[in-house]
Image (spheres, grey):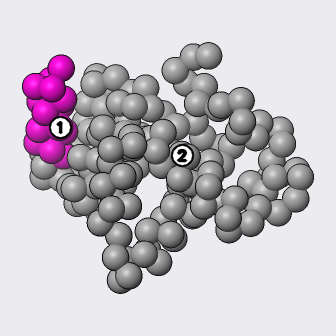
């Protein structure tokens, strides 16, 4: 299995999904989306991150956590049209464009887990300088450098 192939044996193959992302064996239930989403969320973000997020869940934030688990992770990140490396590139760009620095840091780590190299992350951030603006890319480079330095210190 290559780094680009993120499908696991227990995951549905692309040809088992319909154009709308539903499974050939019938519509996906919220419970299935939740389970698939939690699996994908853990694979992309890591168990430690997800465990911290789950532990911080309150009555106020529980519905939001459920929403992102089912729809962001259970639906969008599991669609067959893009591999996880490409989804990470798109997500990094979106975080830069929106100025979402905390989420950007999380997704720099996720991009590495999804197989992007540091040079590929750098190229994505350089691209954002043109389309999102130099100040946004400058901030993004600072965030990414901090994350990469933290990773280097742990290794």
SS type, badge 1 = helix
Q: Pick out the residue farthest to the bottom.
A: 60
Which image quarter holds the N terminus? top right
- 114 left or right of 34? left
Magenta part, dominant SS: helix
Say which residue appears at 50% left-offset and 69% top-offset: 66
**58 lies above or below 149:** below
Q: Pick out the residue farthest to the right.
A: 25
State which tag comes first along the sequence, 1 or 2: 2
Tell me where the magenta segment starts and ends, as one range.
140-155
Camera sees residue 78? yes
Q: Position of residue 137 (x, y in %)?
A: 19, 46
Which residue is disc 1 drawn over? 147
In depth, the one of 18 and 141 nearer the eye is: 18
Q: Position of residue 128 (x, y in %)?
A: 28, 45
- 117 left or right of 79? left
Query: Viewer-nearest of labels 1 and 2?
Result: 2
**78 lies above or below 108:** below
Q: How crowded is the residue under tag 2: few (<14 C-alpha within 10 Å), some, or many (20+)?
A: many
In depth, the one of 63 and 124 nearer the eye is: 63
Q: Quadrant of residue 141?
A: top left
Tag of residue 40: 2
């Amino acid at each position: 299995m290559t780094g680009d192939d993120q499908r696991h044996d227990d995951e549905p193959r692309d040809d088992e999904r319909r154009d709308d992302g539903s499974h050939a064996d019938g519509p996906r239930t919220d419970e299935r989306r939740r389970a698939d989403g939690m699996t994908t969320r853990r694979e992309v973000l890591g168990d430690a991150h997800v465990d911290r997020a789950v532990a911080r869940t309150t009555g106020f934030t529980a519905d939001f956590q459920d929403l992102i688990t089912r729809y962001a992770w259970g639906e969008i990140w599991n669609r067959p049209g893009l591999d996880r490396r490409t989804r990470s590139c798109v997500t990094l760009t979106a975080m830069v464009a929106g100025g979402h620095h905390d989420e950007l840091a999380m997704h720099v780590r996720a991009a590495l887990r999804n197989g992007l190299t540091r040079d590929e992350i750098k190229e994505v951030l350089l691209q954002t300088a043109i389309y999102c603006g130099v100040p946004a890319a400058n901030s993004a480079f600072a965030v990414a450098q901090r994350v990469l330095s933290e990773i280097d210190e742990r290794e």
